[in-house]
Image (tube, helix red, strand yellow):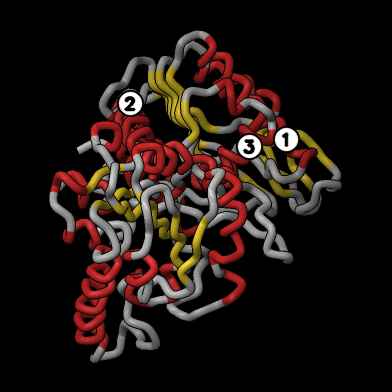
């Protein structure tokens, strides 16, 4: 069943969204992207004449009530975005009466799901090494099913539009789907777009395919790098992981970030790329700073010869040209992770060069997918969000999908 084919008239729909939005110290939303992203799904249900029950998590309250993470703080913002009043249920596990009273066109927002440990389904207050852990885990899984059953009892149908949590087998993202028939559970419009974007990158590849993987650690991206190695023509590895590769090949990296226990892994990636005929692009020069600060003194030096007391903070001019060349002419592009400490305005050149090359290639017909918080922040910072094909809202979920893993939130709907 798809959302557009479903008639919500006279039905109550419970929708899992990702309204884990950033708040300032006064509880005001500083970025409402996630709320705006869910609007097409929510408005379609209301336009059909359905009643809407919205559920989400916020932050990591670890199964305890924490007023600083209460969704009551965003109720008015959600109401303004939807253009209608939003009722609030202060306890997500005790909202049956409020749900039963909902009339077509009305909206009910449930309190933070993660105020209950059953949402995540992990035993609380017991160490994994404890002999009683397995039994506690079993009991918690049973409680998780009951929690999901309670949530499901509020509605006639279930919609999952929270791609950001699709990689988690939580009560509201996967377990709840068991309590609805195949005809009464579906992906939201945002989720459909996200799944299609991943499919474009992994199954519908137009060549050449260039992937850009940045960030500080090679260890966090190894699964993705290995999965992409069989798919890409060009693989750019940038950001802090540059210096692990430089050191692995005998380079001198000064105070640059480095995973000393991953030097063999770095050499193995270089070997794999050679064997598979992948053009692996690594930084040859860098912009180094004498301290980790926006106002640090700068020098340009080889990425494998950073002086003592200096640390690599951004891709150098020659590296920027090499990155742009590998992106130029590509027909499929994936970008996850910046080329430097882009949060510091004086060290954004490498990330900007990547963004500009991607925008240019997209103008020329490439399909470009930007994913992961930092890359999305980059493309927004440089004002180029409207010049790429798709910006993913899911960090961890996107990475796991690209790694080739099954996402529980998607599988639960599709019956896989």
Gap in angstroms between the C-alphas marked 3 and 1: 24 Å
Disc ID at residue 200: 2
Label 1 element class: strand
Dot 2, crowdedness within 10 Å: few (<14), some or many (≥20)?
Answer: some
Relative to 177, say whether 82 is above or below: above
Residue at the image point whose x is 79% and y is 51% from the top: 293
| Percent of width and height locating residue 85 | 54, 53
Q: CA distance from mark 3 to mark 2?
A: 22 Å
Does 116 sit above or below residue 266? below
Q: Earlier in the sequence, mark 2 or mark 1?
A: 2
Residue 324 on image: x %, y %: 58, 19
Residue 307 image offset from top left, x and y in percent: 74, 46
Q: Nearer the viewer, residue 53 or 374?
A: 53
- Residue, disc 1: 301
Q: Residue at x 56, y 39 (%)?
A: 375
Q: Secondary structure at mark 2?
A: helix
Seen from the viewer's position, the closer of residues 120 and 15 is 15
Location of mark 3 (residue): 378
């Amino acid at each position: 069943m798809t959302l557009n084919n479903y008639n919500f008239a006279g039905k109550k729909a419970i929708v899992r969204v990702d309204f884990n939005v950033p708040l300032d110290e006064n509880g005001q939303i500083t970025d409402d992207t996630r709320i705006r992203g869910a609007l097409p799904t929510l408005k379609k249900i209301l336009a059909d004449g359905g009643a809407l029950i919205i559920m989400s998590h916020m932050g990591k309250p670890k199964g305890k009530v924490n007023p600083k993470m209460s969704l009551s703080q965003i109720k008015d913002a959600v109401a303004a975005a939807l253009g209608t009043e939003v009722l609030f249920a202060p306890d997500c596990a005790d909202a049956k009466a409020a749900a039963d009273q909902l009339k077509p066109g009305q909206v009910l927002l449930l309190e933070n799901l993660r105020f209950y440990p059953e949402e995540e389904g992990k035993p609380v207050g017991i160490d994994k090494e404890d002999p009683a852990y397995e039994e506690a885990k079993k009991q918690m899984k049973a409680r998780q099913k009951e929690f999901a059953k309670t949530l499901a009892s509020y509605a006639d149908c279930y919609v999952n539009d929270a791609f950001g949590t699709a990689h988690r087998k939580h009560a509201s993202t996967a377990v709840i789907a068991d309590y609805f028939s195949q005809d009464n559970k579906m992906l939201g419009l945002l989720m459909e777009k996200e799944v299609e974007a991943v499919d474009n990158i992994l199954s519908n590849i137009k060549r050449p395919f260039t992937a850009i993987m940045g960030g500080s650690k090679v260890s966090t991206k190894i699964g993705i790098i290995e999965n992409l190695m069989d798919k890409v023509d060009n693989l750019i590895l940038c950001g802090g992981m540059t210096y692990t590769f430089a050191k692995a090949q005998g380079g001198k990296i000064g105070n640059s970030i480095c995973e000393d226990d991953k030097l063999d892994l770095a050499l193995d990636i270089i070997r794999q790329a050679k064997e598979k005929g992948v053009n692996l692009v690594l930084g040859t020069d860098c912009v180094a700073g004498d301290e980790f600060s926006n106002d640090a003194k700068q020098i340009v030096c080889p990425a494998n010869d950073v002086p003592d007391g200096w640390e690599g903070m951004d891709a150098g001019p020659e590296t920027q040209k090499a990155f742009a060349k590998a992106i130029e002419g590509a027909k499929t592009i994936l970008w996850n992770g910046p080329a430097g400490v882009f949060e510091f305005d004086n060290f954004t050149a490498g990330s900007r060069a990547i963004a500009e090359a991607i925008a240019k290639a997209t103008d020329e017909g490439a399909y470009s997918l930007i994913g992961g918080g930092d890359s999305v922040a980059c493309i927004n910072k440089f004002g180029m969000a409207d010049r790429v094909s798709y910006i993913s809202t899911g960090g961890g979920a996107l990475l796991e999908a690209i790694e080739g893993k099954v996402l529980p939130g998607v599988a639960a709907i599709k019956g896989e």
